[in-house]
Amino acid sequence: MGIFSEFAVVPQNKNWEQLIARNGQLDDRPGDVRSPFARDYTRILHSRGFRRMKHKTQVFFNIDKDHICTRMEHVTHVESVSGTIAGNLGLNTELTKAISIGHDIGHAPFGHHGERVLDQISRKYLGESFWHEKNGLHFVDDVELLANSYNEMKNLGLTYAVRDGIISHCGELDQNGLHPRNELIDLSDFQEPGQYQPATWEGCVVKIADKIAYVGRDIEDAISLGFIDEEGKQQLLKLARANDERVMNTTVIMYNLIQDICENSSPEKGICLSDKFSRQLDEIKEFNLKYIYRNKRFLPYQEYSELLINQIFESLYDLYDPVHIWENLAEEKVYRPDTIESFEGWLAEYCKAIYVPDGSLKDRANACKNRKIYGTLETKELYVSAIIDYISGMTDRYAIKVFNELLKY
Protein backbone atom coordinates (compact mmCIF):
# COMPACT_ATOMS: atom_id res chain seq x y z
CA MET A 1 0.00 0.00 0.00
CA GLY A 2 1.47 3.33 -1.05
CA ILE A 3 0.96 6.74 0.49
CA PHE A 4 -1.63 7.68 -2.18
CA SER A 5 -3.58 4.41 -2.15
CA GLU A 6 -6.71 5.96 -0.61
CA PHE A 7 -6.88 8.36 -3.59
CA ALA A 8 -6.29 5.79 -6.34
CA VAL A 9 -8.90 5.53 -9.07
CA VAL A 10 -10.32 2.17 -8.02
CA PRO A 11 -13.91 1.09 -7.30
CA GLN A 12 -13.67 2.52 -3.77
CA ASN A 13 -12.93 5.99 -5.10
CA LYS A 14 -15.87 8.36 -4.52
CA ASN A 15 -15.76 9.49 -8.18
CA TRP A 16 -15.35 5.99 -9.63
CA GLU A 17 -18.55 5.94 -11.67
CA GLN A 18 -17.90 9.35 -13.22
CA LEU A 19 -14.25 8.53 -13.94
CA ILE A 20 -15.07 5.27 -15.75
CA ALA A 21 -18.01 6.78 -17.66
CA ARG A 22 -17.47 6.20 -21.37
CA ASN A 23 -17.80 8.58 -24.25
CA GLY A 24 -20.28 6.37 -26.10
CA GLN A 25 -19.74 4.27 -29.26
CA LEU A 26 -17.65 1.08 -28.86
CA ASP A 27 -19.43 -1.25 -26.45
CA ASP A 28 -17.90 -3.23 -23.59
CA ARG A 29 -18.00 -7.00 -24.00
CA PRO A 30 -20.10 -8.79 -21.35
CA GLY A 31 -18.00 -10.65 -18.80
CA ASP A 32 -14.75 -8.98 -19.87
CA VAL A 33 -12.07 -9.83 -17.30
CA ARG A 34 -10.24 -6.55 -17.88
CA SER A 35 -10.74 -3.38 -15.88
CA PRO A 36 -12.19 -0.30 -17.63
CA PHE A 37 -8.71 1.23 -17.96
CA ALA A 38 -7.17 -1.99 -19.24
CA ARG A 39 -9.84 -1.97 -21.96
CA ASP A 40 -8.93 1.62 -22.79
CA TYR A 41 -5.26 0.63 -23.01
CA THR A 42 -5.94 -2.10 -25.56
CA ARG A 43 -8.33 0.11 -27.55
CA ILE A 44 -5.59 2.71 -27.93
CA LEU A 45 -2.95 0.03 -28.57
CA HIS A 46 -4.96 -1.38 -31.49
CA SER A 47 -5.87 2.00 -32.98
CA ARG A 48 -4.37 3.24 -36.22
CA GLY A 49 -3.30 6.47 -34.52
CA PHE A 50 -1.09 4.58 -32.09
CA ARG A 51 0.51 2.56 -34.88
CA ARG A 52 1.38 5.71 -36.81
CA MET A 53 3.41 7.10 -33.91
CA LYS A 54 6.28 4.77 -34.83
CA HIS A 55 6.95 7.01 -37.85
CA LYS A 56 6.34 10.40 -36.24
CA THR A 57 9.18 12.66 -35.16
CA GLN A 58 9.75 13.09 -31.43
CA VAL A 59 12.46 15.78 -31.68
CA PHE A 60 14.98 14.67 -34.31
CA PHE A 61 13.90 14.02 -37.87
CA ASN A 62 15.60 10.75 -38.77
CA ILE A 63 13.07 8.48 -40.40
CA ASP A 64 15.78 6.10 -41.60
CA LYS A 65 17.89 5.94 -38.42
CA ASP A 66 16.80 3.03 -36.23
CA HIS A 67 17.98 4.25 -32.84
CA ILE A 68 16.57 7.78 -32.74
CA CYS A 69 13.54 8.18 -30.49
CA THR A 70 10.20 8.26 -32.27
CA ARG A 71 6.88 9.41 -30.87
CA MET A 72 5.89 5.79 -30.19
CA GLU A 73 9.08 5.12 -28.25
CA HIS A 74 8.52 8.27 -26.22
CA VAL A 75 5.03 7.24 -25.09
CA THR A 76 6.34 3.85 -23.98
CA HIS A 77 9.04 5.66 -21.96
CA VAL A 78 6.32 7.71 -20.31
CA GLU A 79 4.36 4.53 -19.62
CA SER A 80 7.42 3.01 -17.94
CA VAL A 81 8.26 6.08 -15.82
CA SER A 82 4.67 6.75 -14.77
CA GLY A 83 4.04 3.09 -14.00
CA THR A 84 7.05 2.94 -11.68
CA ILE A 85 5.98 6.08 -9.83
CA ALA A 86 2.29 5.16 -9.65
CA GLY A 87 3.01 1.65 -8.43
CA ASN A 88 5.29 2.93 -5.68
CA LEU A 89 2.77 5.54 -4.54
CA GLY A 90 -0.18 3.15 -4.52
CA LEU A 91 -2.01 4.59 -7.52
CA ASN A 92 -3.73 2.76 -10.37
CA THR A 93 -1.02 1.72 -12.85
CA GLU A 94 -3.57 0.54 -15.42
CA LEU A 95 -4.85 4.11 -15.61
CA THR A 96 -1.35 5.60 -16.00
CA LYS A 97 -0.57 3.03 -18.70
CA ALA A 98 -3.67 3.96 -20.71
CA ILE A 99 -3.09 7.71 -20.42
CA SER A 100 0.59 7.31 -21.28
CA ILE A 101 0.25 5.42 -24.54
CA GLY A 102 -2.57 7.72 -25.67
CA HIS A 103 -1.20 11.06 -24.52
CA ASP A 104 0.56 11.98 -27.79
CA ILE A 105 -1.86 10.41 -30.25
CA GLY A 106 -2.81 13.91 -31.44
CA HIS A 107 0.71 14.95 -32.41
CA ALA A 108 1.26 16.25 -35.91
CA PRO A 109 4.01 14.93 -38.19
CA PHE A 110 7.42 16.60 -37.79
CA GLY A 111 7.15 17.10 -34.06
CA HIS A 112 6.38 20.40 -32.39
CA HIS A 113 7.24 22.39 -35.50
CA GLY A 114 4.56 20.53 -37.44
CA GLU A 115 2.20 21.38 -34.60
CA ARG A 116 3.07 25.08 -34.92
CA VAL A 117 2.43 25.03 -38.67
CA LEU A 118 -1.01 23.45 -38.21
CA ASP A 119 -1.74 25.99 -35.49
CA GLN A 120 -1.05 28.81 -37.97
CA ILE A 121 -3.36 27.18 -40.54
CA SER A 122 -6.11 26.59 -37.98
CA ARG A 123 -5.97 30.16 -36.68
CA LYS A 124 -6.11 31.54 -40.23
CA TYR A 125 -8.97 29.43 -41.57
CA LEU A 126 -10.93 28.43 -38.46
CA GLY A 127 -10.09 31.18 -35.98
CA GLU A 128 -9.03 28.68 -33.33
CA SER A 129 -5.75 27.29 -32.07
CA PHE A 130 -4.38 23.82 -32.75
CA TRP A 131 -2.49 22.10 -29.94
CA HIS A 132 -1.70 18.43 -29.67
CA GLU A 133 -3.33 17.81 -26.28
CA LYS A 134 -6.69 19.04 -27.56
CA ASN A 135 -6.16 17.26 -30.85
CA GLY A 136 -5.39 14.08 -28.92
CA LEU A 137 -8.76 14.25 -27.20
CA HIS A 138 -10.40 14.96 -30.56
CA PHE A 139 -8.73 11.92 -32.10
CA VAL A 140 -9.68 9.44 -29.37
CA ASP A 141 -13.21 10.87 -29.21
CA ASP A 142 -14.03 11.46 -32.88
CA VAL A 143 -11.40 10.10 -35.26
CA GLU A 144 -9.92 6.79 -34.13
CA LEU A 145 -12.10 3.80 -35.05
CA LEU A 146 -12.15 0.12 -34.12
CA ALA A 147 -14.36 -2.71 -35.33
CA ASN A 148 -16.97 -4.03 -32.90
CA SER A 149 -18.14 -7.64 -32.73
CA TYR A 150 -20.20 -7.12 -35.89
CA ASN A 151 -17.27 -5.59 -37.82
CA GLU A 152 -18.79 -2.14 -37.67
CA MET A 153 -16.24 0.65 -37.28
CA LYS A 154 -16.97 2.76 -34.21
CA ASN A 155 -15.34 5.45 -32.10
CA LEU A 156 -13.20 4.23 -29.19
CA GLY A 157 -15.50 5.37 -26.38
CA LEU A 158 -12.76 5.82 -23.76
CA THR A 159 -13.36 6.58 -20.09
CA TYR A 160 -13.44 10.09 -18.68
CA ALA A 161 -10.28 9.53 -16.62
CA VAL A 162 -8.18 8.54 -19.65
CA ARG A 163 -9.59 11.26 -21.87
CA ASP A 164 -8.94 13.80 -19.13
CA GLY A 165 -5.34 12.60 -18.75
CA ILE A 166 -4.75 13.05 -22.47
CA ILE A 167 -5.95 16.64 -22.74
CA SER A 168 -4.41 17.76 -19.43
CA HIS A 169 -0.96 16.20 -19.82
CA CYS A 170 0.87 19.34 -20.96
CA GLY A 171 4.34 18.92 -19.45
CA GLU A 172 5.91 22.07 -20.84
CA LEU A 173 5.00 24.21 -17.85
CA ASP A 174 7.54 24.45 -15.04
CA GLN A 175 5.44 23.18 -12.18
CA ASN A 176 6.43 21.24 -9.10
CA GLY A 177 3.91 19.89 -6.63
CA LEU A 178 1.07 18.76 -8.87
CA HIS A 179 -2.39 18.33 -7.34
CA PRO A 180 -5.47 17.15 -9.24
CA ARG A 181 -8.30 19.61 -9.74
CA ASN A 182 -11.48 19.09 -7.74
CA GLU A 183 -14.13 19.33 -10.46
CA LEU A 184 -14.90 16.78 -13.16
CA ILE A 185 -15.47 19.47 -15.77
CA ASP A 186 -16.66 19.16 -19.34
CA LEU A 187 -13.39 18.54 -21.17
CA SER A 188 -14.42 20.93 -23.94
CA ASP A 189 -13.79 23.67 -21.36
CA PHE A 190 -10.05 23.33 -22.05
CA GLN A 191 -9.12 26.29 -24.24
CA GLU A 192 -5.32 26.19 -23.96
CA PRO A 193 -2.56 23.75 -22.96
CA GLY A 194 -2.16 23.33 -19.22
CA GLN A 195 -5.26 25.39 -18.43
CA TYR A 196 -6.46 22.83 -15.87
CA GLN A 197 -4.65 20.17 -13.91
CA PRO A 198 -5.65 16.53 -14.43
CA ALA A 199 -8.66 15.28 -12.48
CA THR A 200 -6.74 12.34 -10.99
CA TRP A 201 -3.47 11.79 -9.17
CA GLU A 202 -2.65 9.28 -11.91
CA GLY A 203 -2.98 12.02 -14.50
CA CYS A 204 -0.60 14.18 -12.47
CA VAL A 205 1.94 11.34 -12.44
CA VAL A 206 1.79 11.02 -16.23
CA LYS A 207 2.24 14.78 -16.58
CA ILE A 208 5.51 14.81 -14.65
CA ALA A 209 6.64 11.49 -16.17
CA ASP A 210 6.28 13.06 -19.64
CA LYS A 211 8.80 15.73 -18.70
CA ILE A 212 11.28 13.26 -17.20
CA ALA A 213 11.03 10.95 -20.21
CA TYR A 214 11.66 13.53 -22.88
CA VAL A 215 14.48 15.56 -21.31
CA GLY A 216 16.56 12.46 -20.72
CA ARG A 217 16.09 10.80 -24.08
CA ASP A 218 16.45 14.03 -26.06
CA ILE A 219 19.96 14.44 -24.63
CA GLU A 220 20.90 10.88 -25.56
CA ASP A 221 19.77 11.39 -29.17
CA ALA A 222 21.44 14.82 -29.38
CA ILE A 223 24.78 13.35 -28.36
CA SER A 224 24.53 10.51 -30.88
CA LEU A 225 23.74 13.00 -33.68
CA GLY A 226 26.54 15.39 -32.75
CA PHE A 227 24.35 18.25 -31.56
CA ILE A 228 26.35 18.67 -28.35
CA ASP A 229 30.02 19.66 -28.52
CA GLU A 230 32.69 18.91 -25.92
CA GLU A 231 31.97 22.11 -24.02
CA GLY A 232 28.31 21.16 -23.86
CA LYS A 233 29.13 17.63 -22.73
CA GLN A 234 31.22 18.98 -19.87
CA GLN A 235 28.43 21.36 -18.88
CA LEU A 236 25.96 18.49 -18.97
CA LEU A 237 28.21 16.31 -16.82
CA LYS A 238 28.49 19.13 -14.29
CA LEU A 239 24.70 19.50 -14.21
CA ALA A 240 24.19 15.76 -13.88
CA ARG A 241 26.69 15.43 -11.04
CA ALA A 242 25.29 18.33 -9.04
CA ASN A 243 23.33 15.91 -6.87
CA ASP A 244 25.13 12.63 -7.51
CA GLU A 245 28.86 12.26 -8.23
CA ARG A 246 28.24 8.81 -9.72
CA VAL A 247 26.07 10.12 -12.55
CA MET A 248 27.58 9.43 -15.95
CA ASN A 249 24.59 9.20 -18.29
CA THR A 250 20.99 10.33 -18.79
CA THR A 251 19.59 6.96 -17.69
CA VAL A 252 20.93 7.54 -14.20
CA ILE A 253 19.58 11.11 -14.21
CA MET A 254 16.11 9.74 -15.00
CA TYR A 255 16.49 7.07 -12.32
CA ASN A 256 17.39 9.70 -9.71
CA LEU A 257 14.42 11.87 -10.67
CA ILE A 258 12.02 8.92 -10.41
CA GLN A 259 13.42 7.93 -7.04
CA ASP A 260 13.20 11.50 -5.81
CA ILE A 261 9.53 11.81 -6.78
CA CYS A 262 8.69 8.57 -5.00
CA GLU A 263 10.49 9.77 -1.86
CA ASN A 264 9.14 13.33 -1.76
CA SER A 265 5.56 13.16 -3.05
CA SER A 266 2.68 13.23 -0.58
CA PRO A 267 -1.01 14.13 -0.68
CA GLU A 268 -0.11 17.39 1.05
CA LYS A 269 2.84 18.40 -1.16
CA GLY A 270 1.52 16.81 -4.32
CA ILE A 271 3.46 14.85 -6.95
CA CYS A 272 6.78 16.58 -6.62
CA LEU A 273 10.55 16.58 -6.71
CA SER A 274 12.73 17.83 -3.90
CA ASP A 275 13.95 21.39 -4.35
CA LYS A 276 17.42 20.31 -5.45
CA PHE A 277 16.16 17.86 -8.07
CA SER A 278 13.49 20.29 -9.25
CA ARG A 279 16.25 22.83 -9.87
CA GLN A 280 18.29 20.19 -11.65
CA LEU A 281 15.39 19.30 -13.94
CA ASP A 282 14.85 22.98 -14.78
CA GLU A 283 18.57 23.42 -15.49
CA ILE A 284 18.58 20.38 -17.77
CA LYS A 285 15.57 21.77 -19.63
CA GLU A 286 17.46 25.04 -20.11
CA PHE A 287 20.46 23.08 -21.35
CA ASN A 288 18.26 21.26 -23.86
CA LEU A 289 16.75 24.53 -25.01
CA LYS A 290 20.20 25.97 -25.73
CA TYR A 291 21.94 22.97 -27.23
CA ILE A 292 19.03 21.11 -28.81
CA TYR A 293 15.70 22.85 -29.40
CA ARG A 294 17.22 26.18 -30.55
CA ASN A 295 20.08 24.60 -32.45
CA LYS A 296 20.52 26.17 -35.89
CA ARG A 297 20.81 22.68 -37.37
CA PHE A 298 17.02 22.46 -37.06
CA LEU A 299 16.39 25.39 -39.42
CA PRO A 300 16.46 23.46 -42.74
CA TYR A 301 14.21 20.79 -41.24
CA GLN A 302 11.78 23.40 -39.92
CA GLU A 303 11.59 25.23 -43.23
CA TYR A 304 11.16 21.98 -45.12
CA SER A 305 8.36 20.71 -42.89
CA GLU A 306 6.62 24.10 -43.02
CA LEU A 307 6.73 24.15 -46.83
CA LEU A 308 5.56 20.56 -47.01
CA ILE A 309 2.56 20.90 -44.66
CA ASN A 310 1.43 24.19 -46.17
CA GLN A 311 1.63 22.86 -49.72
CA ILE A 312 -0.33 19.72 -48.85
CA PHE A 313 -2.98 21.83 -47.15
CA GLU A 314 -3.29 24.35 -49.99
CA SER A 315 -3.45 21.67 -52.68
CA LEU A 316 -6.44 20.02 -50.97
CA TYR A 317 -8.07 23.28 -49.90
CA ASP A 318 -8.18 24.49 -53.52
CA LEU A 319 -10.43 21.54 -54.44
CA TYR A 320 -13.31 22.59 -52.21
CA ASP A 321 -16.72 23.07 -53.75
CA PRO A 322 -19.81 22.42 -51.61
CA VAL A 323 -21.66 20.93 -54.59
CA HIS A 324 -18.93 19.30 -56.68
CA ILE A 325 -16.26 18.23 -54.19
CA TRP A 326 -16.39 14.55 -55.17
CA GLU A 327 -16.15 15.43 -58.88
CA ASN A 328 -13.18 17.70 -58.17
CA LEU A 329 -11.46 14.95 -56.26
CA ALA A 330 -12.11 12.45 -59.09
CA GLU A 331 -10.53 14.81 -61.62
CA GLU A 332 -7.53 15.43 -59.36
CA LYS A 333 -7.01 11.70 -58.87
CA VAL A 334 -5.69 11.45 -62.43
CA TYR A 335 -2.63 13.44 -61.34
CA ARG A 336 -2.31 12.41 -57.69
CA PRO A 337 -3.89 8.95 -57.44
CA ASP A 338 -2.41 7.85 -54.11
CA THR A 339 -3.11 11.07 -52.22
CA ILE A 340 -6.62 11.61 -53.50
CA GLU A 341 -7.67 8.00 -53.03
CA SER A 342 -6.50 8.24 -49.42
CA PHE A 343 -8.20 11.59 -48.81
CA GLU A 344 -11.46 10.43 -50.44
CA GLY A 345 -11.49 7.46 -48.11
CA TRP A 346 -10.85 9.74 -45.15
CA LEU A 347 -13.83 11.92 -46.03
CA ALA A 348 -16.06 8.90 -46.68
CA GLU A 349 -15.49 7.57 -43.17
CA TYR A 350 -16.49 10.81 -41.45
CA CYS A 351 -19.16 12.25 -43.77
CA LYS A 352 -22.80 11.19 -43.71
CA ALA A 353 -23.22 8.18 -45.96
CA ILE A 354 -26.07 9.83 -47.88
CA TYR A 355 -23.58 12.45 -49.08
CA VAL A 356 -20.93 9.99 -50.27
CA PRO A 357 -21.03 8.84 -53.93
CA ASP A 358 -22.12 5.31 -54.75
CA GLY A 359 -19.56 2.55 -55.08
CA SER A 360 -16.63 1.61 -52.86
CA LEU A 361 -16.68 4.95 -51.05
CA LYS A 362 -20.35 4.52 -50.14
CA ASP A 363 -19.61 0.99 -48.91
CA ARG A 364 -16.82 2.36 -46.76
CA ALA A 365 -19.07 5.06 -45.35
CA ASN A 366 -21.82 2.57 -44.50
CA ALA A 367 -19.36 0.27 -42.72
CA CYS A 368 -18.44 3.12 -40.38
CA LYS A 369 -21.03 3.64 -37.62
CA ASN A 370 -19.06 6.46 -36.05
CA ARG A 371 -19.84 10.11 -35.41
CA LYS A 372 -20.04 11.83 -38.80
CA ILE A 373 -18.00 14.84 -37.78
CA TYR A 374 -17.82 16.40 -41.25
CA GLY A 375 -21.54 16.10 -41.97
CA THR A 376 -22.07 16.83 -45.66
CA LEU A 377 -19.17 19.29 -45.91
CA GLU A 378 -21.78 22.01 -46.11
CA THR A 379 -19.34 24.67 -44.97
CA LYS A 380 -15.75 25.41 -45.90
CA GLU A 381 -14.88 25.24 -42.19
CA LEU A 382 -15.88 21.56 -42.04
CA TYR A 383 -13.74 20.86 -45.07
CA VAL A 384 -10.77 22.70 -43.54
CA SER A 385 -11.22 20.67 -40.35
CA ALA A 386 -11.14 17.50 -42.43
CA ILE A 387 -7.85 18.52 -44.07
CA ILE A 388 -6.26 19.48 -40.75
CA ASP A 389 -7.32 16.17 -39.20
CA TYR A 390 -5.99 14.32 -42.23
CA ILE A 391 -2.61 16.03 -42.07
CA SER A 392 -2.27 15.84 -38.30
CA GLY A 393 -2.77 12.10 -38.45
CA MET A 394 -0.01 11.60 -41.01
CA THR A 395 3.35 10.06 -40.27
CA ASP A 396 6.45 11.92 -41.41
CA ARG A 397 6.97 9.26 -44.07
CA TYR A 398 3.47 9.58 -45.46
CA ALA A 399 3.53 13.39 -45.49
CA ILE A 400 6.73 13.24 -47.53
CA LYS A 401 5.12 10.75 -49.90
CA VAL A 402 2.11 13.05 -50.40
CA PHE A 403 4.39 16.02 -51.00
CA ASN A 404 6.53 14.10 -53.48
CA GLU A 405 3.43 13.13 -55.44
CA LEU A 406 2.48 16.78 -55.51
CA LEU A 407 5.90 17.59 -57.03
CA LYS A 408 5.06 15.31 -59.98
CA TYR A 409 1.85 17.23 -60.67
Image: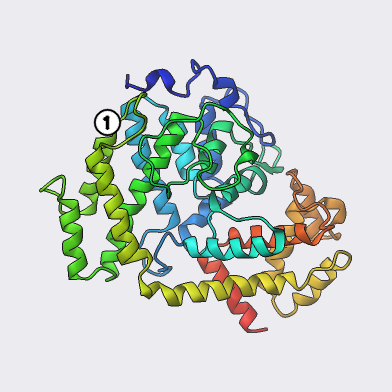
**165 to 172, vertically: above or below:** above
**Spot occupied by residue 112 in the image (x, y as percentages of width and height):** 48, 60
Q: Is residue 221 visible?
A: yes
Report the front residue among 149 and 372.
372
| Neighbours of disc 1 within 10 Å: few (<14), some (14-19), many (20+) | some
Quadrant housing the C terminus: bottom right
- In the picture of the structure, the residue carrying the numbered disc 1 is 264
Left or right of 327? Residue 80 is left
Give the quadrant of residue 277: top left
Quadrant housing the N terminus: top left
Left or right of 255? Residue 145 is right
Residue occupying the point 62% across, 27% down: 21
- Under tag 1, what secondary structure? helix
**Spot occupied by residue 307 in the image (x, y as percentages of width and height):** 57, 76
Report the front residue among 31 and 346.
346
Q: Is residue 67 visible?
A: no
Left or right of 31? Residue 245 is left
**Spot occupied by residue 312 in the image (x, y as percentages of width and height):** 64, 72
**300 to 223, vertically: above or below:** below
Q: Outermost residue, left direction?
A: 245
**Spot occupied by residue 83 in the image (x, y as percentages of width and height):** 36, 35
Residue occupying the point 57% across, 62% down: 394
